[in-house]
Image (cartoon, rainbow, N blue to C red):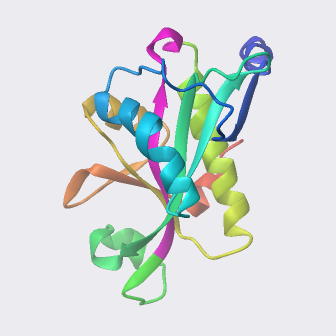
Amino acid sequence: MADNKNNLSRYIISHLDTKHHKADFKCGIHALDEYLKTQASQDYKKNVAVPYVLTQQDSEQVLGYYSLSSIGIFCGDLPPEFIKKLPRYPILPGVLLGRLAVDKNFHGKKIGEYLLIDALKRSVTVSEQIGIVAVIVDAKNEKAKSFYKNYEFIELPDNNHRLFLPLGTIKKLKL
């Protein structure tokens, strides 16, 4: 893992900015490509979501990205074994990892994992400022669902493409 960390140290994750080159970004899922190119900047300006992009230290070309926003989680959507440990509020606060994508030229280089870990670290930091109980993600397909489940995300009972990771689990991870 040390070699992998050294390889990843040449990357920078920052807020999406007008200086970033996103026109050539292609992850293989049209909706994720188009979000970055046409909607992400708008969401940031309107405080709907905060997109974070990964670039190399010497370039502004976007190699990967994710977005974070707040979400209200209906208690009835969560598994009973999870909600029994929480107060009886109808809606609980969370962080939505709205999108996460890696340019297809960089698939297989652990960039998706690097982005996910960064998003989880930011979520823990947010939890120190405002209350959250979990990070929520909507997996675009079975491959994405498998990726998230690999990091202990749990499927919601009535929507197996929406997954969550309890804050307590995130805090126990060695991030």
Q: Determine whether 51 is above or below 102 in the image.
A: below
Q: Is residue 163 magenta?
A: no
Q: Is residue 91 left or right of residue 128?
A: left
| Prevailing SS of the magenta stretch | strand
The percent position of residue 175, horizontal first and vertical second, equals: 71, 42
Q: Position of residue 22 (x, y in %)?
A: 53, 26
Magenta segment, which residues?
A: 93-108
Instruction: Look at 68% across and 64% down and name the residue there.
Output: 126
Which picture quadrant has residue 21? top right
Q: Residue at x 50, y 39 (%)?
A: 151
Which quadrant is the N terminus positioned in? Answer: top right
Residue 41 position (above or below residue 70): above
Residue 171 in sight from this viewpoint: no
Taking the image as shown, residue 5 lies to the left or right of residue 30, namely right
Residue 34 in the image, given as x and y percentages of width and height: 37, 34
The answer to whether residue 113 of the structure is visible from this angle is yes
Kindly give the residue lying farthest to the bottom in the view shown.
88
Of residues 174 and 67, the one drawn nearer to the viewer in this rendering: 67
